[in-house]
Amino acid sequence: MFPITTIDATVLQKCSECDAEKNLCICLSCNLLFCDHIEEDHIFSHFISTQHAYGMNLKEKKIFNLSLDKYDNDFIQKNNCTQLVEYPFDDFISNMITDYNDPLITDNGSERIVEKEKLMNIDLIKNLEDLRNENKSLSTTIDGLTQEKEKQDKQLNEIHQNLVNERATNKQLEKRFNKNLEDLGNENKYLSTTIDGLTQEKEKQDKQLNEIQQNLVNERATNKQLEK
Ligand SMILES: [Zn+2]
Ligand SMILES: [Zn+2]
């Protein structure tokens, strides 16, 4: 299959060898342009050096076989080509399609080409429609995700605010707790001192009590002897 060559009609086309601008032909194998003059025949010298046998006259759009040195009217049909050269920005395009209807080239070829192009267009439109739908569905998904994210951001902010409040409360509680602990420590110390004092007092009293009891026992014994 020969590739489709695009001829930019907005740019002046020239022969690859001599810069000639008239009677240009395109080599269908490598898509280079060459002149086709009687004196300078660069499409032919290109065939001699490369064995690229097929060329097309840009003006008449006729395909020729250089090895046989004659036009090949069945070329498109034989080679299963849809289009060999396209001319954007130029009336040449419509001329090209008209050429396919030329009974000299092919009868069924043009119908097949048009059918094929129609099918390609239907495919393209379908792909476009699929992409649009996919786009819509993605947009909806993005909207949903954005809303969800906003909601989560809000929740996160609330949680953060709660945490800050809680920390402040904790600090106050800690302060109060430390103060209470200190108070209790002081009270404890005071109580310990008091207990120590009371214990000493008690020991003293116990001693005095013992002495009094001893005195009482002694006195009782003396009394009993005196009764006798
Ligand atoms: Zn030339
Ligand atoms: Zn070539």
Image (tube, grey):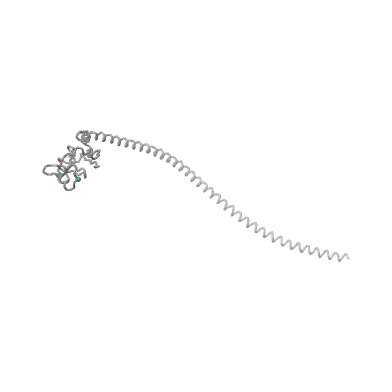
Residue at image point 63% right, 56% down? 188
**Does residue 178 lie above or below 25 as drawn?**
below
Quarter of the image for the N terminus: give it.
top left
Q: In x, y percent, where is residue 224?
A: 86, 64
Residue 208: quadrant of the picture: bottom right
Residue 200: quadrant of the picture: bottom right
Quarter of the image for the C terminus: give it.
bottom right
Which residue is situated farthest in the right direction here? 228
Q: In x, y percent, where is residue 168?
A: 52, 48
Q: In x, y percent, where is residue 70?
A: 16, 40
Report whether 48 appears left or right of 223.
Answer: left
Report whether 186 appears left or right of 215.
Answer: left
How many numbered marks appear?
A: 0
Given residues 201 and 4, the one toward you in this image is 4
Report whether 13 appears left or right of 179.
Answer: left
Given residues 6 and 147, the one toward you in this image is 6
Given residues 189 and 78, the one toward you in this image is 78
Residue 201: quadrant of the picture: bottom right
Q: In x, y percent, where is residue 216?
A: 80, 63
